[in-house]
Image: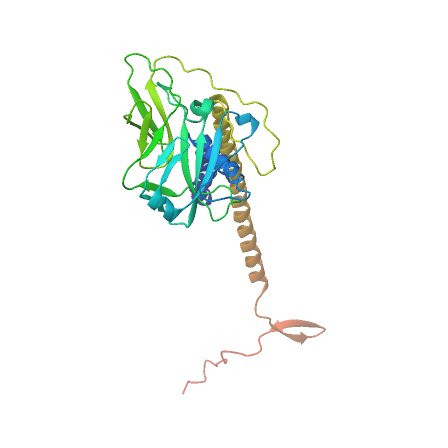
Amino acid sequence: MGLLQRSLPMLLLLVWFFWLPKLKAQSPGSSSRALDALLQDYAYRTFVNPRTGTVYDGVVPSNLAGIKVSALRLRSGSLRTRGVPMYKEFMIPVGLIVQPYVERLVMVYHNLGNWSKVYYPLPGYMYLAPVLGLLAYDASNLSAKNLTELDIMASRQPISIEFPDVKFVPPGSVVKCVWFDLHGLVNFSNLVSDNVCSTFQQGHFSIVVESTAAPSPAPVPSEPPEQAPDEEVPTISGGEKKSNTKVWIIVGSVLGGLALLVLLGFLALWVLRYKHRKKMQQMEKATEVGESLYMTPVGNTKAPAAMVMRTQPTLENEYVP
């Protein structure tokens, strides 16, 4: 039983380690980060014979129709001293700081169109413009995938975002700029003008207004296009599917833990029986091993006899005067 008590905490720890990554994979925002990685790949595919400072528009899969992606390769030094007067809806001022420093970087542009509220749901708010994204990546390897974003920061003036197609604002509504950072946090701010927002960092941006109306249904993707085996298109799974997955994970973990606990019990019993059997064999062997006696002939037979007499016989009257 002592062995079972010591093994139970280790069993629970193993179950926790195997279960935790699956729960993390279902956390909110994972689908939008998967989309960022996919769009980075399609943006880099446009660089066949790239030229610095030229905007290249990418092509996304047909089941993500409506999303636009572009890529712009720049020198870090030129970006800081000159900025970019106009890159799609973004105006990048001088003084942009890039960390860690790279010689060249790629500014990847996103326009999520009618997919905005699918990948960036915002309960209680209505989008007046599509979600636009601006992310920076290292340009040293233009065939790389799943790159980590660089950190960019406007040091002098903010980056301006001018939204060309803003929906009609309901009377009495308060319009806000919304910014989604790379960690899934949501930040609201005031508009600079009727259709302009500003930011000092990268991320995804849009214009929203508070709404009590029920949100319209999200678009359903069509059949996925033919892709290479290493490509993945992020999908949106329903809450019911996620709940069922969690239940099966918990049930599987518990059943696996019980099975392992039973196996450990049988192993402990086998060890105890083996030790007992080994001890009995040693005791039997010890009884069979002893000092052999000297055999002397007595008539036609042999009988054991002591080889040395330890005490000499003494007559009773030997010391009588």
The foreground one among 151 and 15 is 151
Residue 73 in the image, given as x and y percentages of width and height: 45, 43
Q: How many marks?
A: 0
Residue 141 seen in this snapshot: yes
The foreground one among 278 and 190 is 190
Question: From what the image shows, is residue 51 above or below residue 88?
Answer: below
Which residue is at the far right? 300
Residue 320, located in which quarter of the rendered image? bottom left
* Residue at 32% across, 39% down: 93
- Where, quadrant-wise, is the C terminus in this rendering? bottom left
The foreground one among 104 and 7 is 104
Residue 154, located in which quarter of the rendered image? top left
Question: From what the image shows, is residue 109 above or below residue 313?
Answer: above
Question: From what the image shows, is residue 30 above or below residue 142?
Answer: above
Residue 69 in the image, given as x and y percentages of width and height: 48, 32
* Residue at 56% across, 27% down: 62
Residue 55 in the image, given as x and y percentages of width and height: 47, 37
Residue 257 seen in this snapshot: no
Left or right? Give the position of 86 relative to 312. Answer: left
Residue 245 in the image, given as x and y percentages of width and height: 50, 27
The foreground one among 135 and 12 is 135
Which residue is at the far bottom? 321
Question: From what the image shows, is residue 259 above or below residue 275?
Answer: above
